[in-house]
Image: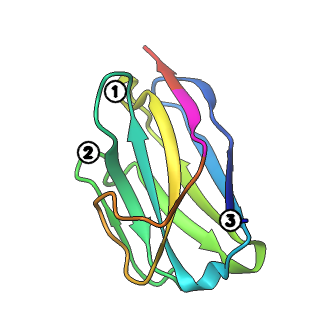
Amino acid sequence: QVQLVESGGGLVQAGGSLRLSCEASGLIFSGYSMGWFRQAPGKEREFVGAITRTGGSTTYADSVKGRLTISRDNAKNTVYLQMNSLKPEDTDVYYCAAKAGWMSSVLEYDYWGQGTQVTVSS
């Protein structure tokens, strides 16, 4: 079965950094674009960023450009979200997702992780 397992979430002060990881299994990892999304209680899940199958291109939501960076290591079946200069409004549950083919900013991904909590204190 396909499984996406996230790690690296936690509590950090405003201005600090975290690195989230998402390890994939049960799929041909290099055949999937990978995305990161986030969701607060009572709100819709929103797009954070995505990376192409080879890692050659990325795209980000305007709210995180310059602060959050997506990368991937296909040899490790892992995608990363490096989070710098964190703000309290970045507090959310963060989800990774896998999509066959081209990366997308909408909820049209094939597989989803369980989510990991990121809390940024003021």
Amino acid type for the residue under numbered disc 2: Ser
| Residue position for label 3 | 2
Amino acid at circle 3: Val
Q: Residues within 10 Å of mark 1 (few under 14, many from 20)?
A: few
Residue 11 image position (x, y, % from top left): 60, 23
Q: Secondary structure at mark 1?
A: helix
What segment carries the magenta color?
114-118
The mark closer to the camera, 3 or 1, is 3
Q: Earlier in the sequence, mark 3 or mark 1?
A: 3
Q: Residue at x 60, y 71 (%)?
A: 72
Between the residue at mark 3 and the residue at mark 1, the CA separation in whole angstroms equals: 31 Å
**In which quadrant of the rendered image does the N terminus lie?**
bottom right
Residue behind mark 1:
89
Give the mark toward the camera: 2 or 3.
Answer: 3
How packed mark 3 is, by other alpha carbons closer than 10 Å (few <14, some 14-19, many 20 or more), is some
- Residue placed at 34% from the left, 41% from the top? 45
- Residue 6 in percent (x, y) is at 66, 48
Whether the magenta-drawn stretch holds residue 93 is answered as no
Q: Residue at x 57, y 40 (%)?
A: 115
- Assess whether mark 2 and mark 1 are in contact (beta carbons under 8 angstroms): yes
**Disc 2 marks which residue?**
63
Residue 25 percent across, percent down from the top left:
74, 67
The kind of residue on which mark 1 rests is: Glu
Is 24 situated left or right of 120 in this image?
A: right
x and y, in percent, of residue 119 in the image: 52, 23
Seen from the viewer's position, the closer of residues 44 and 84 is 44
Q: Main secondary structure of the magenta part?
A: strand
